[in-house]
Structures are given as structure tokens and as C-alpha cells.
């Protein structure tokens, strides 16, 4: 191409426009977060969502058109979900030393996250489809959307709830753990990875490498646990 304008003309008529825009927004959001010293409120995911949502609203672009171009990122959720097993394999010796406490925390945390939503949602009178969309919110997006879709829920709504859960966890984890005087970074990381999946794990890595490691392990294990617990509770209670 002889002129940059030619690139814009090509992208503007191609689904690649939205993929390119998504990547550029993410790079910008990451830079803002780095400049603000990884402040919890300067979460790259939150900034990216806000900017992209405003862009779609301003230009009147339907989500379906945006997704047509950005769906490649959605496709990568599958490989990314599988790849979270890598840190578990690499750090198996360190993990093995804390295996029993981790299993106990995994069972209690995963079951509590699902059961609490089941009870609150039933009390609030949520419909079956809505309740199913809420249940896997603490699992990573690829797993949560697959669970929701297989049980008859709305995977798009589940994705929104997953992101909101992750952002909330990333915002409150540090002050909450400090208030509870939990200083063990392995415990802090495992807790946030268990409840806030990838977004919480990214925040844990910003705070401490050990916290990030155990957050990644918790995210991987909770993806498995949630995929077992949610269908079981749905069949028993719904």
C-alpha cells in the first residue's frame, strides 16, 4: 500500500476493523494501567470494555457486526483455557507441598460460589435460564460460556457476568486481604484465582509472583471443579 489511507479504506470495509480496534484499545489500556502503576481501578479489561462499548454506541454499530470481526479473540479462549494447565505442571513440586489445603479450599470455594448464587437467585425469583447464566460466573470465560450454553443458559450474559466478577475481584482483593491480615501470598493468590479467574490472576501477578502463580493454579482447578459442580446442582435443584 502506497498510502496509510489505503489501509484505512481496506479495514473500514472488512471485519478486520473490529479485531484491529480491539487490539489497539487493549494496548492503550495496558499502557494506561502501567502509567498508573497498576492501580486496581486502572484495570485494562475494564478500560477496554468501556472504550469499545462507547465506540459501538457512538457509531451505532450492532454487537453482531463487532463480533463478526472480533470473534478470532473469542476463538482463542479455548486454547487459552487449556494453556492454564501449564503453570500447574511446571510448579507441581511447589504445589504438591500445599496440595491438601488447596483441595479443601477448592472444594469449599467452588461449591460456595455456585450454591450461594443458586440460593440467592431462587430467593429473588430469577428464571431458570437467567439462573444458569449466573452459576458459572467464577470460572474462566471459555469454560463458563460452554457450561451455560450446554445447560440452556445465555452464554453472552454469562460472559458479561464473568467479566464483572473478575473486575470486582481484582478491585477488592488487595484491600480485603489486607483488612483480614492475610499475608501469605500463596493463600492470597489462590483465593483471587478461585473467585475471579483470569482478571484476578492478572492482578495477582501485578502484586507478587507467588500470588500470581497460585492464582493461575486456582483458576485452572476451579474451571474443572465448576464444570462438575454446576451441572450437578442444576440437575438436583432445577
Image (cartoon, helix red, strand yellow):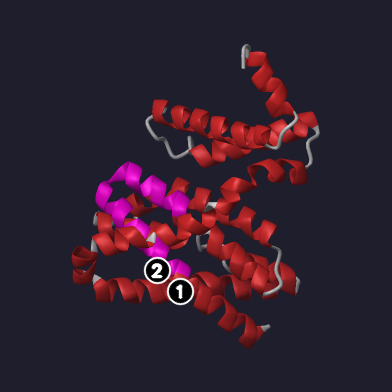
Which contiguous range is marked in magenta? Answer: 198-223
Q: Quadrant of residue 102?
A: bottom left
Secondary structure beneath disc 2? helix
Q: Is residue 207 magenta-colored?
A: yes
State the quadrant of the C terminus: bottom right
Position of 122 compared to 105: left or right? right
- Vertical arrangement, residue 225 with respect to residue 156, above or below: below
Q: How many marks?
A: 2
Where in the figure is residue 15, as x and y percent of width and height? 70, 37
Mark 2 → mark 1, Cα distance in angstroms: 6 Å
* Viewer-closest of 77 and 145: 77
Q: Is residue 146 above or below residue 27?
A: below
- Image height check: is 84 above or below 4? below
- Relative placement, left or right, of 76 versus 220 is right
Query: In the figure, is residue 185 to the left or right of 236?
Result: left
Residue closer to the observer: 92 or 116: 92
Residue appearing at x 27%, y 73% in the figure: 101
In this rendering, the answer to whether 14 lies above or below 107 is above
Q: Residues within 10 Å of mark 1 (few under 14, many from 20)?
A: some
Q: Is residue 106 visible?
A: yes
Q: At 41% from the left edge and 28% from the top edge, which residue is drawn?
A: 36
Specify the label residue 221 is tagged with: 2
The quadrant of the picture occupied by the N terminus is: top right
The main secondary structure of the magenta stretch is helix
Q: Which residue has dot 1 on it?
A: 225
Determine the secondary structure under disc 1: helix
Residue at 57% from the left image edge and 83% from the top image edge: 232
Marks 2 and 1 in Cβ contact (< 8 Å): yes
What percent of the width, then of the height, locates residue 199? Answer: 46, 49
Amino acid at each position: 500500500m502506497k498510502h496509510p489511507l489505503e489501509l484505512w479504506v481496506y479495514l473500514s470495509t472488512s471485519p478486520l476493523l473490529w479485531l484491529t480496534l480491539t487490539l489497539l484499545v487493549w494496548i492503550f489500556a495496558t499502557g494506561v494501567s502501567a502509567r498508573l502503576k497498576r492501580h486496581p481501578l486502572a484495570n485494562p479489561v475494564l478500560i477496554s470494555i468501556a472504550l469499545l462499548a462507547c465506540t459501538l454506541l457512538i457509531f451505532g454499530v450492532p454487537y453482531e457486526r463487532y463480533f463478526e470481526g472480533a470473534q478470532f479473540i473469542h476463538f482463542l479462549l479455548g486454547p487459552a483455557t487449556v494453556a492454564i494447565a501449564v503453570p500447574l505442571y511446571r510448579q507441581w513440586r511447589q504445589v504438591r507441598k500445599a496440595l491438601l489445603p488447596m483441595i479443601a479450599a477448592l472444594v469449599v470455594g467452588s461449591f460456595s460460589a455456585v450454591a450461594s448464587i443458586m440460593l440467592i437467585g431462587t430467593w429473588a425469583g430469577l428464571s431458570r435460564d437467567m439462573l444458569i447464566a449466573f452459576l458459572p460466573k467464577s470460572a474462566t470465560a471459555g469454560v463458563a460460556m460452554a457450561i451455560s450454553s450446554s445447560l440452556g443458559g445465555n452464554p453472552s450474559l454469562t460472559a458479561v457476568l464473568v467479566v464483572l466478577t473478575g473486575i470486582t475481584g481484582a478491585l477488592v482483593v488487595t484491600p480485603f486481604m489486607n483488612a483480614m491480615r492475610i499475608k501469605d501470598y500463596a493463600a492470597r493468590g489462590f483465593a483471587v484465582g478461585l473467585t475471579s479467574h483470569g482478571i484476578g490472576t492478572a492482578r495477582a501477578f501485578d502484586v507478587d509472583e507467588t500470588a500470581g502463580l497460585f492464582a493461575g493454579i486456582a483458576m485452572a482447578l476451579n474451571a474443572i471443579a465448576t464444570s462438575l459442580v454446576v451441572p450437578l446442582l442444576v440437575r438436583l435443584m432445577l
